[in-house]
Image (spheres, grey):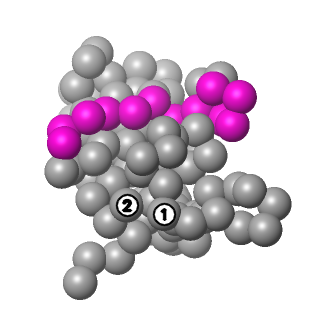
């Protein structure tokens, strides 16, 4: 059974990709913006804060209600649909963390 995307899972992903193009701090200057994709529908959602402003890193709070599966006692989103994956949007295309990390490597070696 697929696991839901949760706040804890985002933290683990950030740790796993630390220092690579799979995190916002290492790919922002190349035009990548944190985003999510619902693999069931193909829709891509920019990472936003609760108020809808673009977030500089992955945040579940700005996702549409139809993706949300669980909130904590204060109303913060802590889990979304199992079909949602984190990644990045760049020039209208979605990239997984792995794909973004590869692109950053390729770009840096191309200098």
Of marks 1 and 2, which one's residue comes earlier in the chain? 1
Q: Residue furthest front?
A: 66
Instruction: Tell me if mark 1 has few (under 14), some (14-19) or many (20+) residues whose alpha carbon lies within 10 angstroms of its own.
Output: some
**Contact between labelled residues 2 and 1, with CB atoms less than 8 Å apart:** yes
Above or below, 2 relative to 73 = below
Q: Which of the image's four quarters has the N terminus? A: bottom left
> What segment carries the magenta color?
41-52
- In the picture provided, is 33 more to the left or to the right than 58? left
Is residue 101 visible from the viewing direction of this image? no
Cα–Cα span, label 1 and label 2? 6 Å
The circle on residue 81 is 2
The correct choice, above or below, for 82 with respect to 84 in the image is: below
Pick the front one: 17 or 87: 87
Q: Quadrant of residue 11?
A: bottom right
- Residue 64 appears in view: yes
Point 66% across, 35% down: residue: 49
């Amino acid at each position: 059974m697929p696991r839901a995307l949760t706040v804890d899972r985002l933290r683990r992903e950030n740790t796993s990709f630390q220092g690579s193009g799979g995190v916002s701090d290492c790919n922002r200057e190349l035009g990548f913006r944190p985003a999510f994709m619902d693999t069931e529908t193909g829709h891509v959602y920019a990472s936003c804060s609760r108020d809808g402003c673009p977030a500089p890193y992955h945040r579940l709070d700005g996702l549409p209600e139809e993706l949300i599966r669980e909130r904590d006692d204060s109303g913060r989103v802590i889990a979304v649909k199992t079909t949602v994956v984190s990644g990045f949007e760049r020039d209208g295309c979605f990239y997984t963390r792995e794909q973004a990390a590869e692109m950053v490597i390729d770009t840096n070696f191309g200098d």
